[in-house]
Amino acid sequence: MINNRSLLIVGGLAAVAWLASNSLYVVNETERAVKLRFGEIIEENIQPGLHVKVPITQTVRKFDTRVLTLDTDTSRYLTQEQKAVIVDSYVKWQVINPTRYYEATAGDELMAIRLIQPRVDESLRNEFGQLSLQEIIAEKRDELMTGPTEDLDRLMREELGVAILDIRVKRIDLPEDVSAAVYSRMRSEREREAREWRAQGSEESERIRANADRRRQVLLAQANERSETLRGEGDAEAAGIYSEAYSVDPEFFSFWRSLNAYRESFGEDGGNMMVLDPSSDFFRYLKSPDQPES
């Protein structure tokens, strides 16, 4: 009797443990779940916490709702002018509708990736096809991916129940056959800009030089005018002094002028020769300083 009772107790506890393990389940904070009955969804978007289900007939599928990263394959896209670019990108996505996600992918993450990746490739192909190579190189990558991210997000919410949070371009390369042409074009563009800047600089330098020359001529003219004025004033003042001195003692002034004339005529080199009448006034003071002027 004791053994049978122990067996019954043990069996009862085992049954309770089995019932509890198959009836209770926990959804973590990073998960959402759906409850199925023979494969049909009977409860959607189950929130985190402890929940109950009917064993055997009901099952629960849990999905990770954290932000996931999908590294897409490197792809070759054509630009607006049919130039090829090699693009390496990645996608940030998240499950937001567990019911739609389960219906589209059966809860298989690999299946979801296989469905998302072609859509991303198509979206990027369309976006790059609308842009020129110069725009792709010059524009900021964050702005470049805004349109494709928004369009793909609306589509994936409806089709897969996932949100496309971001599409980022990690790298954009040019094929070897395009790189040389692009670099040559960029070099030509930079050389053209350099020529324009040099032309503007030369024009500005000529303008500054012409302005400086004009100011120089004006200053020289003003200086010459001032010097002529001062010279004229000095000559007039000197003539006045000479005239005043001559009027005080005409004889002395005549004598002084004669001495200056002798000094200039009979220089130190001794090579001067003059043919004059000895009785001319030039030799008057050499003959007799006191002789009056005839």
Image: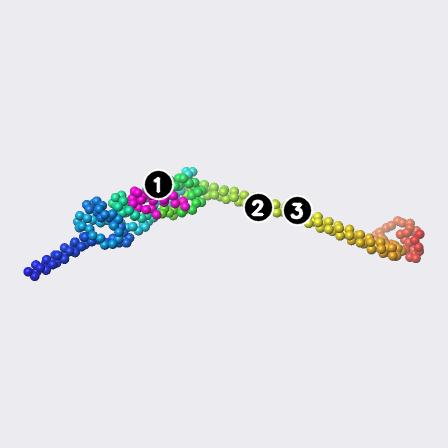
Residue bearing the label numbered 2: 201
Residue bearing the label numbered 3: 214
Q: Residue at x 41, y 46 (%)?
A: 143
Give the residue type at disc 3: Arg
Give the residue type at disc 1: Glu
Tell me which segment is drawn in magenta: 143-165
Image coords of residue 285 (percent x, y): 90, 55
Mark 1 or mark 3, which is nearer the start of the sequence? 1
Q: Residue at x 57, y 46 (%)?
A: 201
Q: How many marks?
A: 3
Q: Is residue 101 above or below residue 258?
A: above
Q: From the viewer's perspective, is the residue at label 2 or at label 3 nearer?
A: 3
Density class for disc 3 (Cα within 10 Å; few <14, some 14-19, many ≥20) is few
Q: Quadrant of residue 253?
A: bottom right
Marks 2 and 3 close (CB-CB < 8 Å): no
Q: Residue at x 39, y 41 (%)?
A: 127
Residue bearing the label numbered 1: 122
Mark 1 or mark 2, which is nearer the start of the sequence? 1
Can residue 216 be spotted in the picture? yes
